[in-house]
Image (cartoon, rainbow, N blue to C red):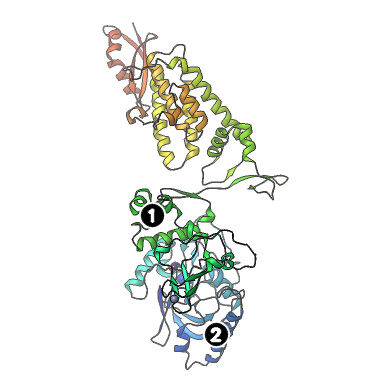
Amino acid sequence: FVDFPIKDTEAKVRVFTTRIDTIYGANAVVLAPDHPLIAEQMEDSALKDDVLRFVERIKVARASRTTAPGEEEEKEGVNTGMFALNPFSGEQIPVWVANYVLMEYGTGAVMSVPAHDERDYEFAQKYSLPIRRVIERVSYAQESIEHDPTSEDQSAAMPHAFTDYGILVNSGEWSGKLSAAAIREMAAHAEENNFGAAAITYRLRDWGISRQRFWGAPIPIIYCAECGVVPVPEKDLPIVLPEGVEFTGTGQSPLAGVAEFVNVNCPQCGGRARRETDTMDTFVDSSWYFFRYCDPQNDAVPFDKERVAYWTPVDQYIGGIEHAVMHLLYTRFWTKMMRDIGLVDFNEPVKNLLTQGMVTNVVEGTGEWKAMSKSLGNGVDPDEMIAAYGADAVRLFTLFAAPPENELRWQETGIEGAVRFLRRVYNFVYRWRETLIDAPTEAPAEFSAAARALRRKTHQTIARITNDFDELHFNTSIAALMELSNELQDSGITPEQASAADKFAVREALEALTLMLAPFTPHIAEEMWEGLGHAGGILGSRARWPQADAELAKKEALEIPVQINGKLRARVPATPETSEEELRSLALADDKVRLHTDGREIVKVIVVPQRLVNIVVR
Ligand SMILES: [Zn+2]
């Protein structure tokens, strides 16, 4: 908040703002019609009658109107004749009263910054207040709004407000700072000089949870003529909904017509009383159902605290963005209430939120991609897709086509790609299954270069997917699985010629591939797992997620062949960064190489970095 002193008085008006960085653009302080300053300071003002008439008119209009206060279509205001002093610039600005400022929000007073707030812009244009630009865009991605660089007042040039953050201009010593820094530093400056402070404000409204519906949790309240509102005693909870209720459609709760439900004895005096017949909003239930899921059979308490402490808070919430404003807010609020009464010991019900993107498809005849809907006729029936391609392929395509938080464009060629990929890995398993029966179970000491490369790729893939999976990057996980299957294909290792070590490497790769496919394509993965000799499948054999060996996954393990007079004589370890000079000395120092070079004349050494060293001797 920032305190604006009222000129020639001791009074100050306190203003809440989230955009202190725009304060040099304030052209007025605007009060709510019922702000106490009006009565306090206008006693001797010549404008008193005008202002009070306006305030009265707004009050009457609000009382007779159905729109919520502050949402009146036409913004109206009147100048009070008072002046406020901008504590940053010392500038004197008028104090207005207007219908769009509410006493219930913040402090009932705002600073009007028309260049950077749409509502203030509208108000300033209507009452011909000057508009000063104090925020400039910082990126070309932001909208460029016309203005007149030769004029201090932009009311003619600016077509509407610029409401983004940006860089400060026309703001005295703060000019040139970015909004974020300015907000921080200006709040600190206000605090040091005792005219303001940073604060967190809450805007909480009451939540009416009663509904005139049958299907909902009964509200455990009894009305007694003698005792008033009496809560149902705990021993009588839960209240069970009656059956055989008639739905009249009259708008009253259907429960109101069920005499044996409504008529009860007062728990306090025993006299005749009535039970509440409204039920709770379903948002009440969705606020804490996941706590109850941890202990659904408990008939003594909502849930056992220890059980809930074991399972919650929820690790990952996945839902559409439409949940972010209502359901999730209620859930958070409810959780804080349960924390306050000692049922849970954390503040937030959910650790991670993922709002998944829309699935879109072309609307025929328009070329436009829109969310699938019946009315647009661009929907795709998942059952038909599954019948045509199989559930695994449809799911793989859906997860591969886009990160889950992005829009997914439905393109059937993508499903065909998924089918081809699955067919390839499936064939691979069946081509190898006989050969792998006698593959060693312990890693042999020596591997061919091809097998080493395959193992490296296998462990790199495990590491990558283990990480991506936690981050819900399913599309990159699937891409990594495709790369691993390519490596298998390109390794040149064949069932016919595979050594024991080769078999070990191939089985390691195929098993990892299969297990990591399982979350995406469970059906085919189960088949493949059995094909690899594991009776009972993945679930039946209690298979575990593969573990990456960091040593094997290390990238830079090159083996550079060394030829002497055209014959392969040795391999030297290197990395892609090993220089030509280093490779040359590594090769010449190698024991196997020296067997062939000692005592002979080295005519030439040809080094192809990352590939080969060729030595010519005579
Ligand atoms: Zn009573």
- The residue nearer to you, when weighing 28 against 563, is 28
383 left or right, relative to 478: right
Residue 49, by quadrant, is bottom right
- Amino acid type shown at disc 2: Val
Tell me the quarter of the picture where residue 423 sits: top right
Q: Position of residue 482 (x, y in %)?
A: 50, 30
Residue position marked by numbered label 1 in the rendering: 303
Mark closer to the chain start, 2 or 1: 2
Q: Residue at x 48, y 58 (%)?
A: 285
* Numbered mark located on residue 55 in the image: 2
Nearer the observer: mark 2 or 1; the answer is 1
In the image, residue 58 above or below residue 113: below
Which secondary structure lies at badge 1? loop
Q: Residues within 10 Å of mark 2 (few under 14, many from 20)?
A: many
For the C terminus, which image quadrant? top left
What SS does tag 2 mark?
A: helix
Q: Position of residue 577 (x, y in %)?
A: 36, 28
As drawn, 270 above or below 82: above
366 sits left or right of 502 in the view:
right
Can you see residue 577? no
Q: Where in the figure is residue 66, as x and y percent of width and height? A: 61, 75
